[in-house]
Image (cartoon, rainbow, N blue to C red):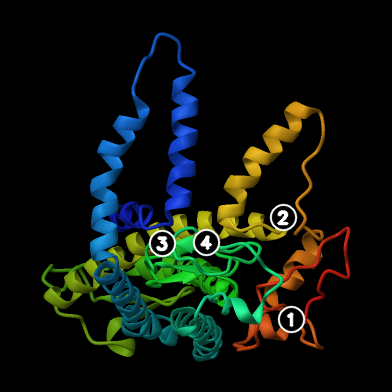
Amino acid sequence: MRIISKLFFVSNFVISKITRKQIWKKVRQKIGNIPHLSIDWDDLTDRFIEPVIWVVDHFSDSLGKIFVSLVWLLILFVVGVAYWIGLSFYWNISAELTIALVIFGHWILLNVVFHYYMALITPPGLPPDAEQIPHIKARCKKCQSVKPERTHHCSICRTCILRMDHHCPWLNNCVGHFNHRYFFLFMAYVVLGMIFLFIFGAPVIVHELSISDASEQPIGYPVFHNGSHLLPVKQVEEVTPPRSRSLRRAVSVTVAILCAGILAALGALVGWHARLISRGETSIENLTNKDDREAKRLEGSTFVNPYDYGSYENWRIFLGLSEGRTWRCVFFPSVHPPRGDGISWCFKNDLTHVSYK
């Protein structure tokens, strides 16, 4: 659990500079309201954040590769333990139940691997040359590229990203217009997989922790509880050596702790991104829109997000459910592109601005 917490702590710093500035601005505003507290926040912020920025700027590529390797290793480890310990446990209870769990579990695993791989290899989207979109005059001050709406510069990738959400170290890639769906569905299916493992893994862990070591001298003969009856061990399995039994217990507990940490972290992240998607916002836009909402509130008016088409339509746009595509593209792997090109957007008050493709 401590390792997972540290990794997620480090990854929180691997984000775009605009996000970091917004976060520190909020922190300074909140603490600055405390009376009789005089602190040079600019100097304090610079002293604290500069070493972190230096590490991220110089080692982000290496750190990203390490994080990606960790993700693949975690997937292999959890799946391997499920086969090693869980499969034999449920097979001794019911072959039919085991087959059903294997099919359902592999459906989740297929979606996890597919969406993670696609999020890794799919470019988030780069602005085209200025000659291709002469009607857009905005330019990025850092890389001098053309800057369409909802485009932001990533200081780690050192380029502008179409409809940028954030830079994800676990992907070693930015999350933008063309891979945002893969990123979100990967997290969603991981959370579903963790819930699946907790529900059907709990009896396995209880079984592993409740069985006495073979080194003990039992009264009578060893038995196995199959869920409804006590059966002699010799009918279902040989007595496991004490060293192997201790290893199985340690591995079972380790997987349970890992899954708990992953479920807590990704569960919160999935809920956060689902809320943003329902509102038609990216992570960066959520920060900037908060300031706009507050400014409008002080003016006595209401802030209107021009990219919010209502929760249902926002989800259809995000998932790319157009041109006859159905929810099958969500429940099964699909490489269909998102709606639109990430350059032009359709506003509520100007439906002719450029429609979605």
What kind of element bears circle 1? loop
In this view, the mark in front (3 or 2) = 2
Image mark for residue 92: none
What kind of element bears circle 2? loop
| Label 4 with label 1: CB-CB less than 8 Å | no
Residue 298, placed above or below residue 57: above
Q: Which amino acid does label 2 sit on?
A: Arg
**Cα–Cα span, label 4 and label 2:** 26 Å
Q: Which amino acid does label 4 sit on?
A: Cys
Q: Residues within 10 Å of mark 4 (few under 14, many from 20)?
A: some
Residue 22, placed above or below residue 119: above
Q: Mark 2 points at which residue?
A: 279
**Cα–Cα span, label 1 and label 3:** 26 Å
Q: In which quarter of the image is the C terminus?
A: bottom right
Q: In which quarter of the image is the N terminus?
A: bottom left
In this view, the mark in front (4 or 3) = 4
Q: Residue 32 in the image: x percent, y percent?
A: 45, 21
**Cα–Cα span, label 4 and label 1:** 37 Å
| Label 4 with label 2: CB-CB less than 8 Å | no
| Label 2 with label 1: CB-CB less than 8 Å | no
Q: Residues within 10 Å of mark 1 (few under 14, many from 20)?
A: few
Q: Name the residue under label 1.
A: 327
Considering only order in the chain, which callout, 1 or 4, is on the residue closer to the N terminus?
Answer: 4
Q: Residue 169 in the image: x percent, y percent?
A: 37, 66
Q: Which residue lies furthest to the top in this view?
A: 36
Image mark for residue 262: 3
**Cα–Cα span, label 3 and label 2:** 26 Å
In this view, the mark in front (2 or 1) = 2
State the residue in front, 161 or 281.
161
Considering only order in the chain, which callout, 3 or 4, is on the residue closer to the N terminus?
Answer: 4
Q: Mark 4 points at which residue?
A: 140
Q: Residue at x 29, y 65 (%)?
A: 60
